[in-house]
Amino acid sequence: MLSKLSVVVTSVLITLAAAIPTTIPVTPPTSDQCCDSVIDSSSTAVGVVLSALGIDLGDITVPVGLNCSPITILGNNCGGITTRCDAPEIEWGGLIAINCIPITL
């Protein structure tokens, strides 16, 4: 009887441990983008685009890439500004990319 109880208690503890969510800080993945322009998020023009997409950055000021497309091949002929941006959890159809830092490939 005692061994059955210990098996049940152990099983419950293992199940609870697996069910408890853990928060591990993760750096967002980045992606190389070719953007027409990179503008500060505090700009009125960017504010209009962010509002239209339902994005609220709050008081955070970051460089936002406008009209961006991913660079998938090294040496891609980017006619705009080559940047490294945080990969969005939601794709916005290439309209914007967040936290874009200009780079040289």
Image: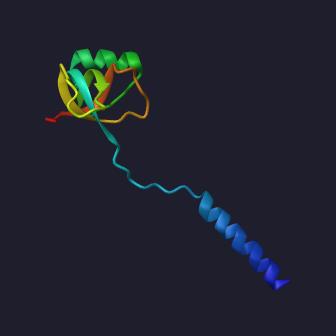
Q: Nearer the viewer, residue 90 or 59?
A: 90
Residue 75: give x, y in percent of width and height. 20, 31
Q: Horizontal and vertical percent for residue 26?
A: 38, 50
Residue 6 in the image, given as x and y percentages of width and height: 75, 79
Q: Quadrant of the N terminus?
A: bottom right
Give the image quarter of residue 10: bottom right
Q: How many marks?
A: 0
The quarter holding residue 33 reads: top left
Q: Position of residue 44 (x, y in %)?
A: 23, 16
Q: Residue at x 32, y 31 (%)?
A: 58
**Residue 27 falls left or right of residue 35:** right
Residue 68 appears in the rendering: yes
39 shown above or below 31:
above
Question: What residue is at 42 percent from the left and 34 percent from the top?
Answer: 89
Q: Which of the two residues, 80 or 61, is positioned nearer the viewer here?
A: 80
Q: Residue furthest left?
A: 104
Using the image as rendered, state which of residue 16 and residue 34 is in the foreground: 34
Q: Residue at x 35, y 36 (%)?
A: 87
Q: Is residue 61 visible?
A: no
Q: Residue furthest bottom?
A: 2
Return the residue nearer the eye: 92 or 17: 92
What's the colour scheme?
Answer: rainbow
The residue drawn where x is 71% and y is 70% is 11
- Quadrant showing the C terminus: top left
